[in-house]
Amino acid sequence: MHTRFLFLAFSLATSSLALIGCSSSDDDGSGDDGSTGGSSGSSTGGSSGASGSATGGASTGGSATGGASTGGSATGGASTGGSATGGTGGGSPGCESACARVVGAACGPTTQADCVAGCNSLTTTCPDEIGPYNECLSNPANAVTCDTVNMAAQIAGCDDQVRALSVCGICVADPTDVACGTCSRSTCCDELQAYVSAADVDVFDVCVTPCADQACVDACTAASPLAGAAYAAINDCQIDSCGEECVCSASAEDTTCVACLKVGCCAELIPYVAAEDLDGFAACVEPCADQACVDDCVGQFPVAGSAYNTLIDCAGTSCLDECGS
C-alpha cells in the first residue's frame, strides 16, 4: 500500500460548494460515523503528498536527490467534502436559509454570496441530494456550531443528508483544483466516493492526517479498515491514472533538484514514489556517503531501490547541474 494521497493542493472538501469543512454531528457536538468534518480546505493530500522530497538519499557522485521519502502529510484536510450546501435552484429560499445558518456559525471566511452561489451550482449536479440537505440544514431544530479546532461547521441531526451530498459532490469539478485534483475527481471518482461513504472515514481521517510514514498509515487502516482500504485504492488510482498530474506537478516546496526531476524525469519519478518499500529505502539511503551503502539499501528494499537507480540515471542525464553536488 502506498503511503499517502497525492492530492498536493487538492482537497477532498468540495470547495466549490462554498461551505468547506461543513459536517454533520451528533446533538452533543461529537461527530459520529456519519459525520464528515475535517479541516477546511486542507489537502486530502494535505501538504503536497509525494512532492518534492520524493527522491531520498545520497548517491555516489552527489547526484542523489536527497530528502525524506514521500513528503507531505497523509491525507490532509476534510475527508468527505461535507461542505456541500445543497439548494433547490438558483436564488432559491432553500439556499439562502441554509447558507445563512452556516455563515452565521462564523466558521471560516465564506460569505453568504459565495455560499449561495455554490449551493445553486449543485442544483443540476446533485439534484436528488441537495434538496434534502438544504431542508435539514434550514431546520432550526438542527443546531449548527463551529468546530474551532478544524474550523468546520458542525450540523446536528443531518448525518444522512450530509453523507449523500458528500458522495455526489466529491466528483464535481472544482475551479480551484490543481491538475491532480481535476484528474482525480474525473478518473478516480468511484474510489473517492467509496472513501467518502465509508462508515469509519471520520475516525480514519483524524488518525491518518498527521501520518508521516507507512507504519502510521497501516495502524490507522487496521483501526478503520473500510476507509483505510478505500484510501489505498485512491492512492493506487492516482499513481496509475494521474501519475503525471499528482506526482510531477510543481510545488512551492520543491528543491531545484526535485523541480528538475519532475520536468525531466517524471516517468522515472512516478514508480519511485509508488514503491511499496519506499519509506524503508529512504530512511536507509538518506545517511549514505558511498555507493556501497546505497547498494546495501537497494538490496534491502529492492522495489524502491531499483526505481531509485533508474531515477538517478535519469538525473545524471537531465538534471546533473540541479542535482549534482
Image: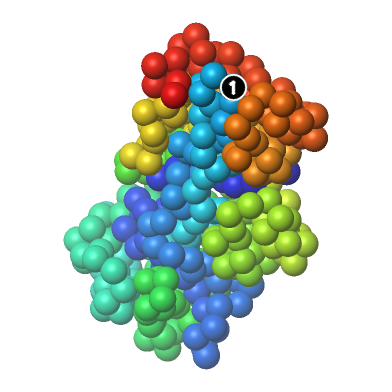
Viewer-nearest residue: 112 or 139:
112
Q: Quadrant of residue 19?
A: bottom left
Where's the C terminus, which quadrant? top left
Q: Residue tagged by mark 1?
A: 60
Going by the numbered disc 1, the residue's amino acid type is Thr
| Nearer the observer, 101 or 13 | 13
- Residue 109 position in % (x across, y down): 24, 66
Residue at coordinates 42% horizontally, 71% vertically from top-left? Answer: 150
233 left or right of 21? right
Q: Dot 1, crowdedness within 10 Å: few (<14), some or many (≥20)?
A: some
Q: Identify which residue is drawn at 44% across, 29% down.
A: 258
Task: Look at the image and tell me whether residue 77 can be seen.
Answer: yes
Secondary element at image label 1: helix
Taking 62 as reference, is 36 above or below it?
Answer: below
Q: Is residue 246 above or below residue 268?
A: below
| Residue at the image position 55 percent from the left and 60 percent from the top | 209
Q: Position of residue 266 (x, y in %)?
A: 51, 21
**In the picture provided, is 303 more to the left or to the right than 241?**
right
x and y, in percent, of residue 124 in the image? 40, 46
